[in-house]
Amino acid sequence: MKSFLSILGVVLALGLSDSVRAEEAEKEIKGEGLCLKCELKKADKCTNAIRVKGKDGKETLYVLEANDVSNAFHKNVCSAVIKVVAKGKVKKDGDKNILVASKIEKDDSK
């Protein structure tokens, strides 16, 4: 009986570790890159964001966490709205979607 419980414990632990890894997986987001301060007037300082329009017409706004990647890309969106593709980890802060970007580039596809 002890060996069964030990095996069950190991299986449960592995299952939980897989679910944690799934939450930490990077996500690709395509949308309109813009500045929360300059374009949307929703911030006191320049902050990158990506606006994604779903098939149902509903908009989702991802605020980019300040890091080297988002800071370097900001010059592209501070004075214009452009199509972008970003990769990174998404986390929630209340009702806000926060993207910790590992890569951002202009989306040149049609």
Image (cartoon, rainbow, N blue to C red):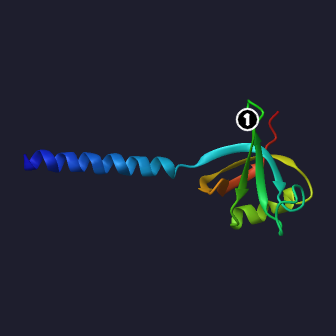
Rendered location of residue 87, percent (x, y): 65, 50
Rendered location of residue 53, percent (x, y): 77, 38
Q: Is residue 24 left or right of residue 49?
A: left
- Residue highlighted by disc 1: 54
Q: Which residue is depicted at the point 31% across and 48% down?
A: 14
Q: Which residue is depicted at the point 80% across and 36% down?
A: 109
Q: Is residue 20 left or right of residue 85?
A: left
Q: Is residue 91 left or right of residue 53?
A: left
Q: From the image, which quarter does the C terminus lie in?
A: top right
Residue 37 falls in which quadrant of the image? Answer: bottom right
Residue lying at the far right in this picture: please name it: 79
Q: Is residue 23 above or below residue 71?
A: above
Q: Residues within 10 Å of mark 1 (few under 14, many from 20)?
A: few
Rendered location of residue 33, percent (x, y): 81, 51
- Is disc 1 placed on a helix, strand or loop? loop
Residue lying at the far left in this picture: please name it: 1
Q: Is residue 3 left or right of residue 106?
A: left
